[in-house]
Image (cartoon, grey):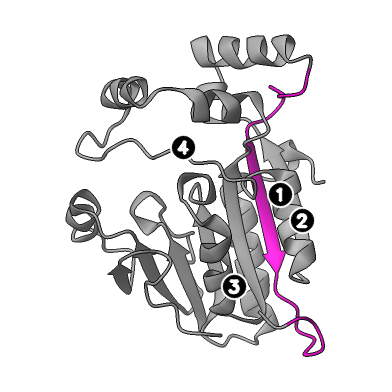
Amino acid sequence: MADVWSVARGDLFEQRIREQWTEQLGRRLDLLVAGCAHDPPPSLDTIDARIIGIDEDLPAIRALMTERADLDSWSLGDLRSVPVPPRSFDAIQVTFLVERIHHAELVLDRLLNGLRPGGLLLLRMRDRSTAYGLCDRLTPGWVRRLLWSRLSKRESMCPLPAVYEPVSSREGMHAFCLMRGLMVSDDVSSTSGPAMAGIGSAIVRLVDKLSRGRFTSSYDEVTMVIRKPQNHFARLI
């Protein structure tokens, strides 16, 4: 596992995308951003890239998307059925989405179907098996809405749901990749957001102590770079 302090989270995705572009000898890079309403695309200056976004079709998200100028195009709909053309993207970015949706494995399979052979899934998520993940999924909805209204700069948006299906953990994602013949080339853990300081940090440390380390407070966020195989003998996705 990579040292969390040696690689900046945003820089890791940008570095892997630039490497992918170089391997393709400068051919245009097609990038899909899933959950794009809350997730800006990486900075790709000097790279010839087409960036497309998809997200759920909700009034607040639609209003937000009309103001976006960093995407070439976007589509809204149920993530289980929103158009994702097969083998059309060189990289797909999925940030803080897997833990927020139902049928996460189905959505991931649809996204992977949209990757070209050798393409990259750039994944960032909160880990359900951490102290923060446990607190997040057990916090009542009304408390989440109250905290969101006080802390969020996007008051028009509702707080993101906390679903946390089994795949939204480091172990669950590695098992998912193993079953589909995918290679995890980077796996970085870090602490961010409310778990970093103040009362949030105190709560997750308490959960860690009470659970005797079963739900760790050493990290809450996992960043992975996952590669779809080039070999046509590998399992088709």
Within 10 Å of the Cα at label 1, are there few (<14), some (14-19), or many (20+) other Cα atoms?
A: some
Tag 3: amino acid? Leu
Residue at (61%, 77%) from the top-left corner?
21
- The type of residue carrying mark 4 is Ala
The amino acid sitting under disc 1 is Gly
36 left or right, relative to 4? left
- Along the polypeptide, which appears first: circle 4 or circle 3? 3
Give me the residue at 77% from left, 66% from top. Answer: 179
**Residue positioned 25% across, 53% down in the render:** 61
Mark 2 sits on what residue?
Answer: 175
Query: N-terminal of the two: label 2 or label 3?
Result: 3
| 30 shown above or below 164 | below
* Contact flag, marks 2 and 1 (Cβ < 8 Å): yes
Residue 35 picture location, percent across and down? 41, 57
Vertical placement of 228 versus 232: above or below? above
Q: Which residues are magenta?
A: 213-235
Name the secondary structure under disc 1: helix
Measure the C-alpha gap from mark 2 to mark 1: 5 Å
Q: Which residue is mark 1?
A: 172
The alpha-carbon separation of the residues under discs 4 and 2 comes to 21 Å
